[in-house]
Image (tube, rainbow, N blue to C red):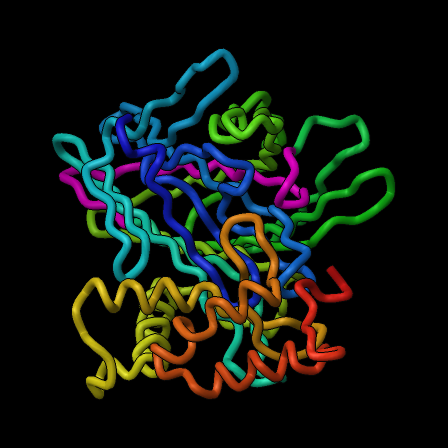
Amino acid sequence: MPDLDTREWLLTNGLGSFASGTISDVRTRTYHGWLFAATNPPSGRTLVFSHLEASLEVSGRAIALGTNFWGHEQISPQGYKLLDSFDINPVPQWIWKQDNWQLSRQLLMPHGWGGGKNDIGSHRLLIQYRYEGSDPAILRLRLLIGDRDFHHQQKVDSGLEFSQLLAQNQVCLQAIFSGDFGTPWHLRWTQGEYQADAVWYWDYQLPFEKERGLGDREDLYSPGYLTVTLQPGDTVTLEAQTGFPDQLQSILTPEIFAAAVEAEQERLSQIFGWGENQLPTSPIWQQLLKASDQFIVYRASIAGPTVIAGYHWFNDWGRDTLIALPGLALVTQRFELAKGLLQTFGRYCRHGLIPNVFPDV
């Protein structure tokens, strides 16, 4: 799969949480997964939701759309061979296609920080599948989950268990390890039937970690799978979110995904003044501006902005923040952000020096 397993995508939410993977949909790093939640923004990043393993049944024939590396250099299934296209704008979108059907998937991580001290949202991921074809289809989505530090690999352990509580169109999940509880989160969906079917998948291989001389094997837990019957033109929307379900939250609908995409585009437009022509409007420049915003995050310990030194594995560092500040905040005309960054690190200034890391890291 030339280039498809080396070209990567990244989603962030301004709180330190992220989602990341490859165009081919195969996981090659410890840092690939759909929801790494920053439990102490922007640090404490924990993988809770790895991905959904999808298969599509059309005219009685089931087709696996996922791609996985396993131990002993095996690749199975090989869904990347059906991948027709990938696009990053406005959100990552994959399209798998065969003779008489097409399935698209889009991912979006809503921004969780509005810029103010009290304007803090949640750690969420939205997913939407859309089916087109000449016949109805059955989409099966198997949940692959974990509960681990983003630097580590998860292994089957006699002391590691997962609880799941099923309600209407949602399931709440939480790891339990030797009496300690992990990060709770829940997944909900617009349509489909969920079947609890607990099973471990052993021995995923992560080739890039092997190249780095680090642990390169991981086991993932699956609590069950979702089965959705789709007519041509139908969609199914899912939302993963940390915490326990809120009884007051609105019902999940397909329109929520479109509204979230529109809200993200509007947020970026306001930040960079695209509509007012304050900055260059070429596609390359806009993509750079969009990428630069992914490094700006909220630090809970000081209730202010800071800069992630790099993805996937760095935290926010004083040295890197000051090096990057002119490009991230001045060239982009985000002067209030520049002021906030200087205030963030200035409050820790001692004898003319600022720290490279924060006390709670």
- Locate residue 44, reporting x and y percent: 68, 56
- Main SS of the magenta segment? strand
Nearest to the observer: residue 97 or residue 327: 327
Residue 209 at x, y = what percent?
Answer: 53, 30
Q: Is residue 218 visible?
A: no
For the record, the magenta segment spans 130-153
Horizontal and vertical percent position of residue 140 = 41, 36
Q: Is residue 185 left or right of residue 279?
A: right
Q: Is residue 86 left or right of residue 221?
A: left
Foreground of the two, 232 or 296: 296
Query: Which is more toward the observer, 151 or 196?
Result: 151
Look at the image and tell me whether residue 309 can be seen: yes
Q: Is residue 230 left or right of residue 184?
A: left
Image coords of residue 73 (percent x, y): 45, 14
Position of the N terminus, as image quadrant, is top left
Does the magenta segment cover residue 136?
Answer: yes
